[in-house]
Image (cartoon, rainbow, N blue to C red):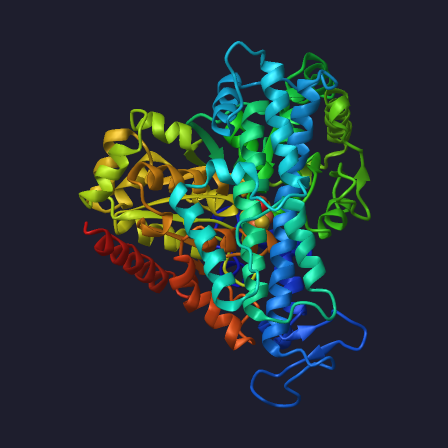
Amino acid sequence: NGHDSRSIDPAAKEMLRIADREGYATIWERYEQQQPQCSYGQLGTCCRICSMGPCRIDPFGDGPTRGVCGATADTMVARNLARMAAVGSSSHSDHGRKVALLLKAVANGSNTDYHIADPDKLTAVAERLGIPTAGRSTAEIAGDVAAVAIDCFGNQGEEPIVFMEKYMPKKRFQRLRELEETLYRTTGAKTGLLPRAIDREAVDILHRTHFGCDHDPLSLVAQSVRCSLSDGWGGSLIATELQDILLGSPIIRPVKANLGVLEAESVNVVVHGHEPILSAKVVEMAQSPECRAAAEAVGAKRVNVVGLCCTGNEVLLRQGVGMAGNESHSELAIMTGAVDAMVVDVQCIYPALADLASCFHTKFVTTSEQAKIPGALHIQFEEHEADAIATRIIKTAIDAFPNRNKARVYIPQHTSTAIVGFTVEEILKALGGTPQPLIDLIVTGTIKGVAGIVGCNNVKVQQDFFHRTLTEELIKRDILVIGTGCWAIAAAKSGLMDLPARELAGPGLQAVCGQLGIPPVLHMGSCVDCSRMLNLAGALADHLQVDISDLPLVGSAPEWTTEKAVAIGTYFVGSGIPVHLWPLPPILGGPQVTKILTSDAKDVLGGWFFVEEDPKATADRMEQIIMERRAALGI
Ligand code: BF8
């Protein structure tokens, strides 16, 4: 019964039975070996910032109430949280930076392996940024867009970054500006909320959380919000917008999801990580005559590239590539014995994958200078030689294919169909070019509101259980569910993104899905594409001339794991959206920080965090928030 408590996914259950039988180590097993986990760490009251420590504070009053330097539990919690937000924001944003630099290289002709795949999107982004487009070449416009994006990372001025200023809805921008002014007036101390340069906000956190700097929980939380906003309306947004320009904008289309996308007769290449600059090339080059011939020469049907995690979402959305699974599936995919190469770039890659791959013929290929893993084969990816390197990577998989031990291959035959690709542009197109029909549906109560669900799998939660149950509970209540990341993969695998899923929705949502020919649960992309959700919220807010915090919108990260999820949750809150979290964030040891984030933020920002373990109770609370907001709007 052990595997059933680990995952609700039928493919995962089959693979976990094999793992138990063969003795393969997994996250679940290593998690058990880690018990009991440190409760100071869980509560956030452990400080390792200087060498007088480590210090820890028992929040129940046993022992000292201050660290050696005098830091309180709240200071420790707030500093730790700020560092999580900085790391999460930096990960998304550094990804965005690479895309901006690539756009510059394509624009000036120094990179010819990529090109402007969506000139219409380029024009739309340029116009939004106020860059002239009439009578100018694509390369000129692209160069200017890249320059504005790059400037958002390193500008040394005090003004908010251009991307945020041009994309954030007006009322939200004003509210944050007024809040900064009020805080200055009432406290006499400067507290910024609108991000300056993206790099600066993360460095600011590294500086202010150094030994002996900022000890004020409110100030530390405010900077966490500011840094996270530089991710949502900056780094992540730049990643999304410029990837659409360079790799093509997603369109609504059906795909297959779950381990059944692996093919027994083909060379299987799993792309895992986050940056489609690599994965999209692997998908593209797998179709080249050279790779096809090489695959046939070793007796394979073809090269079958499938995705895992967010880079899987990127190629699923843009190239219709099958999705092998979300975070907790990464080990299980290798255990099928049918993966000839797993190719990774950055973020959310378990180092354990290298050891596991060595039990099989599987080549575990790292490609990024920022993510090297002992035991992996490193093939350095360089954008200016992308075609050649992607081909080399695929050849590695083809060379491994003959070593596959067919007796050990087991591919669980589970796939679901998912209709994906719901970008803001595609949603507006489906609505006839304006958000008005969606607003009308919300005003009449046909749809009560919109819930955005994001984030990972977490070994502390039965895989996909919270994602699936919460999603089903919300659509049942006529709440449209949109989202990204590993949640989106969970929803795709569960069949919730297929058209028949509308039967699970309440009568209002069901009718809308029937009319528009869409599922009740919409895949908006990878985690950097949470910026698409912000943009959708922004489009609704600007259309109605209200703030995002007035709209019946709510968020959740019900199986969150990473620091990037902290950044996402925090920029949602900073953008005026209440956010549910499970598992517990490491803040509860700081009563003042907990109060700021779960209560005070509500009045100040219009968004706040709440924690809840039960999916049904979470849906109740999310519906209640939506109903309160509807009432406040008089609808
Ligand atoms: O950025 S949802 S486990 S894969 S952090 Fe990672 Fe979490 Fe998955 Fe993508 Ni997002």
| Residue 270 drawn at (x, y percent) | 64, 35
Residue 21 is situated, as x and y percent measured from the top left of the image, at 64, 56
- Quadrant housing residue 528: top right
Residue farthest along the top direction in this orientation: 135
Residue 306's place in the image compared with 548, above or below, is: above
The spot of residue 343 in percent (x, y) is 70, 36
Whether residue 585 appears in this view of the structure is yes
Q: Nearer the viewer, residue 551 or 9?
A: 551
In front of the other: 524 or 59 = 59
Residue sitting at 68 percent across and 27 percent down?
A: 102
Classify residue 386 by image quadrant. top right
Residue placed most toward the observer, 131 or 571: 131
Asked whether, in this view, residue 505 is left or right of residue 372, the answer is left
In terms of image quadrants, where is residue 498? Answer: top left
Residue 320 shows up from this direction:
no
Residue at far bottom of view = 62
Q: Which residue sits at x=58%, y=44%?
A: 159
Q: Position of residue 572 (x, y in %)?
A: 46, 51
Query: Relative to 7, is 518 above or below?
Result: above
